[in-house]
Image (cartoon, grey):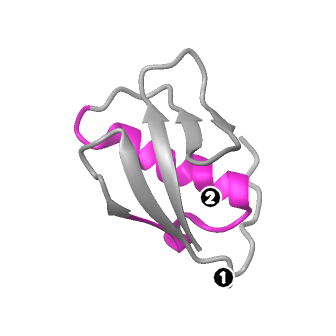
Amino acid sequence: MRIDVHVIPGSNKSSVEPGDPLRVHLHAKPVDGKANEELVELLGRYFGVNCSAIRIKNGRTSRNKTVDVNLATTPSIPRNS
């Protein structure tokens, strides 16, 4: 599944707002790929898939991104934090 995502880095807390595009608030700053890493982890939890099922296709250095989500992968196993 391919989705459009609008990323808001540097937010107070990380969250996902449904819509088109999906609005994703990230705590991480857009430095050294930290925001993209957090985006992949957050979308993995949101869709219930492993992080390896999430790929940023376009917009790696932009707030507007196109992301591929492979929902056919096995569901992620929740980790104790």
Taking the spot 42% from the left edge, 20% from the top edge, the residue there is: 10
The Cα atoms of the two marked residues, 2 and 1, are separated by 11 Å
Query: Which amino acid type is marked by label 1?
Result: Thr
Residue bearing the label numbered 1 = 73
Please tell me how crowded label 2 is: few (under 14), some (14-19), or many (20+) other residues with Cα within 10 Å: many
Q: Which residue is drawn at 77% across and 57% down?
A: 78
The residue under the point 76% across, 47% down is: 80
Between residues 55 and 78, which one lies in front from this camera angle? 55
Q: Main secondary structure of the magenta part?
A: helix
Q: Quadrant of the N terminus?
A: bottom right
| Residue 52 on image: x %, y % | 50, 71
The answer to whether residue 46 is magenta is: yes
Quarter of the figure with residue 19:
top right
Secondary element type, mark 2? helix
Relative side of 57 to 47, left or right: left
Give the residues drawn in magenta, as a range.
Answer: 31-56
- Left or right of residue 42, residue 9 in this image: left
Q: Which mark is residue 44?
A: 2
- What amino acid is found at the position of numbered circle 2 in the picture? Gly
Label 1: how many Cα within 10 Å (few below 14, some 14–19, many 20+): few
Q: Where is residue 69 in the image (x, y as percent from the top left)?
A: 56, 70
The answer to whether residue 47 is above or below residue 1 is above
Q: Going by the picture, which residue comes out furthest to the bottom? A: 72
**Residue 26: x percent and y percent?**
50, 31
Question: Residue at left 61%, top 48%?
Answer: 20
